[in-house]
Amino acid sequence: MSGSDQMRILAVLPVLGQPRHAKRLDTLKSMDFHTSAIAFRREFHSGRLPDCDVQIIGQAEQGNYLHRLLSVMRALPKARAAIAKADVIYAFGPDMALLSIVSQFSLGGLRKPVFMEIGDVVPLQVAGGLKGYLFRLVDRWLARRCSCVVTTTPKFLSEYYHRWLGTDVAGLVLENKVETSFGNIVRDGGLRRPRKRGPRDRVRIGYFGLLGCPWALEVFEQLSRRHPGRFEFLLAGLPWTGVDVDGFLRRMGDQASYRGQFKSPNDLPDMYNDIDLVWACYPPIGPRDFNLRWARPNRFYEACMFGVPLLSRLGSCDAVDVERFGIGLTIEQVDAGETADWISANLTDANLARWRDAMCDVPIEVFQYTSEFRVLAERLLAAAHESHR
């Protein structure tokens, strides 16, 4: 193997439609890697499909880990056939990495390099008791059999894989930043056009992506009740199980609207240019909500690209940069009513203008890819070369 154009990368996807997965594959394809994917069919926000050949290998179970594991294991024969033709396996999540590794046990001694990308740390991974301990044993076993663990935030790697699991696995941080090509189009093509709000207009807050936080909707309703006429809300994305978006919209009347699911990145300019603030605030963080402390949603990077200030949860990764660059409001309140009063008191016209102006000074490398994919490409090539020796 002499170059990326001869190297075959097989992505193993737990679901189709996740924009992060498509970003990875499309970028690698643009770098002349040959990309393909195997995936499970599951109800999910179909925000973006990868631009490559995709084979559906099974139906994924939602929620129940045991049922999900069984559905993954049933896909072993199809996964094995696809893996045998690849040079490197790029698995999204521990279950897909497990499938990729177990599938190779009967490939005549072949061991294709497996890169495992981690976008979340689920509660079971950091749970106390026997369940959590056993899960971490499996995680440690998996990590030590991967050529590289790619994480979407530095803390997933340093806190969970290095400190909690005690591994020295080779790692790489690849945040959910905006693709270079699209970021350049936004700036050079004039797609960053901040909403011009008149003095009598309501403050419009946007909540985009997986709409999975009932607490957020409760805060929105409190803002409407306690401060009538000041706010309105724009929602877009996939309502998650247990979140009553329809009921919220009925109760809010003309103070809230829902655009349905959206396509990333094409629909982003219309969404972000139509709001004054981005809701990127997690619900109150409990003592074992490590994912909320360590993760960072796409909304942070997209908001920076379009210059829209953020509402962020104190104690999260986002809040560090929101305060460092002065680009929004951090929230530490737990009660929804108190949160609404805090937001309303701080959303003055002067603050909104100051936060928006500060967005212009956020360094591009904070929200847009620079050299990250070149580093990933070098790691992929090195792993493939090593396996062919």
Image (cartoon, helix red, strand yellow):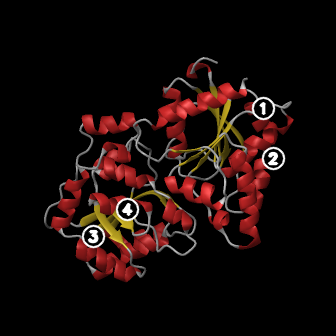
Q: Which mark is residue 231?
A: 3
| N-term-proximal mark, 3 vs 2 | 2
| N-term-proximal mark, 4 vs 1 | 1
Check disc 3 and give the amino acid type: Phe
* Residue drawn 63% across the image and 66% down it: 123
- Helix, strand or loop for disc 4: helix
Rounded to the nearest angstrom, the CA distance separating label 2 from label 1 is: 13 Å
| N-term-proximal mark, 4 vs 3 | 3
Check disc 4 and give the amino acid type: Val
Q: Which residue is mark 1?
A: 81
* Residue drawn 66% across the image and 69% down it: 127
Q: Which residue is mark 4?
A: 320
Quadrant housing the N terminus: top right
Q: Position of residue 323 (x, y in %)?
A: 31, 63
Q: Which residue is mark 2?
A: 74
* Residue drawn 54% across the image and 63% down it: 291
Rounded to the nearest angstrom, the CA distance separating label 3 from label 2 is: 50 Å
Please tell me how crowded label 4 is: few (under 14), some (14-19), or many (20+) other residues with Cα within 10 Å.
some
Q: Position of residue 100 (x, y in %)?
A: 73, 41
Q: Are marks 3 and 1 in contact (CB under 8 Å)?
A: no
